[in-house]
Structure formats: structure tokens, C-alpha cells
Image (tube, rainbow, N blue to C red):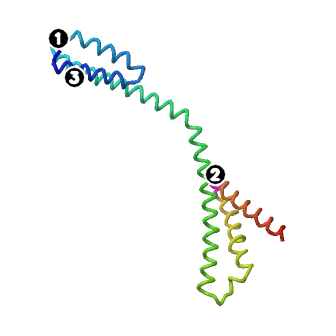
Amino acid sequence: MGAPRTLAAKLLGGVARLVPEETRDWAVAMLRELDFIEGDWAAFFWALGSTAAILRHAVSVWRGWLKQKGKKEAGMNNTGKKALGVGLGILSALALVGCLFAGLRIIGILFPGLGLEHSGWAYWLAVMAIPEAIFVVATVLLWRKKGPIAAGILATGLAMALHVGVHFAMR
């Protein structure tokens, strides 16, 4: 057996191991037919053509698998998108509260004459009243088109209101 025929046999053998189960029998049959082709170079070129045909068929099988897999996972993707939306809503609400709190601190540092460090109403206004109003407006505006984000904002607003309620109940 010459080098071209040996290479052809190894090529078809490797392809037969890599292709999906639906194509494997066909690839093994082409490998067995290689023994009946006369001439080493003819066998080599026949193996190249067979490999191309086998790979085209394997690609069509793999595409079918991907389409089926995509259809099965559509519900999971939708749930993941909703969870991501709720998470983004919570993060955006917390970022707003953090920015308002930081802004109040910066104003207190830049303008010490205002006496905001010792003023309880300024903290309640910056950390509770303004964000809660923004949360209500954002929830109403986003509810129809961006429901999960609105739900995250609403959850954060309710958690903050509960925190304030517990704070006042403890005093």
C-alpha cells in the first residue's frame, strides 16, 4: 500500500470517528470501499471527494441539532432575560440612592455652612423621599414595555420603605 492510499485511509478513518452517529455508517462504508479502488492516487482523490460529501452531510445534521436545541431553550432564555431585567432594575435603583447619598455628602463637604451633616431631614429627603418618588414614576412608566426592570425597581422601593418602617418602629 502506497503513501497516498495510506493517507486516504487515515483521512476517511479520522472523519468516520468525528462525524455524528447519523453519518458514521456512511463514512465507514466509504472507508471500506477504498479497498476496491485501483491506483493509489485514484484512491486518494476518491477519499478527498468522499470526505467532502461526508462533511457536508455532517454539517446538515449539526444544523438540525442546533435548531432543535434553540427551540427547546427558548423558554429558559426568556426566564433569564426577565431575571436579568429584575437585577438591572434593582441595581439601577440602588445606584440612584447611592448617587443621591454621595451627592448629599459632597454638598456637605463643599458647603459646610449649610449644616447638612447634622440635619436629619436632608438625609431623609435625599435617601428616601426623592428616590421613592423616582421609583414610583419609573415603575409606572416602565411597567408595560420593560416589566422586569420595573419589578426590580419596585422591589427595591418596597424594601427601602420596609427598612424605614422598621427603623421608625424600633425608635
Residue corresponding to mark 3: 7
Q: Which amino acid does label 3 sit on?
A: Leu
Q: Which amino acid does label 2 sit on?
A: Pro
Question: Which label lies toward us, 2 or 3?
Answer: 3
Q: Say which of 18 and 161 sits in front.
A: 18
> Going by the image, does 80 lie left or right of 13?
right
Q: Position of residue 163 (x, y in %)?
A: 76, 64
Determine the image quadrant of residue 87.
bottom right
Label 2 and label 3: CA atoms lie apart by: 58 Å
Find out whether residue 143 is within the magenta segment: yes
> Going by the image, does 11 lie left or right of 72?
left
Graded by Cα atoms within 10 Å as few (under 14), some (14 to 19) or many (20 or more), the crowding at tag 1 reads: few
Find out whether residue 13 is within the magenta segment: no
The residue under the point 41% across, 24% down is 20
Name above or below for residue 37 compared with residue 171: above
Q: Where is residue 32 in the image (x, y as percent from the top left)?
A: 29, 12
Asked if marks 2 and 3 touch (Cβ < 8 Å), the reply is: no
Q: In which quarter of the image is the C terminus?
A: bottom right
Q: Which stretch did the figure color magenta? A: 142-150
The residue under the point 68% across, 68% down is 131
Name above or below for residue 162 compared with residue 55: below
The residue under the point 59% across, 80% down is 106
Name above or below for residue 72 compared with residue 20: below
Q: In which quarter of the image is the N terminus?
A: top left
> Considering only order in the chain, which callout, 3 or 2, is on the residue closer to the N terminus?
3
Residue corresponding to mark 1: 38
**SS category of the residue bearing label 2:** helix
Q: Position of residue 84 (x, y in %)?
A: 59, 50
**SS category of the residue bearing label 3:** helix
Residue corresponding to mark 2: 148
Label 1 and label 2: CA atoms lie apart by: 68 Å
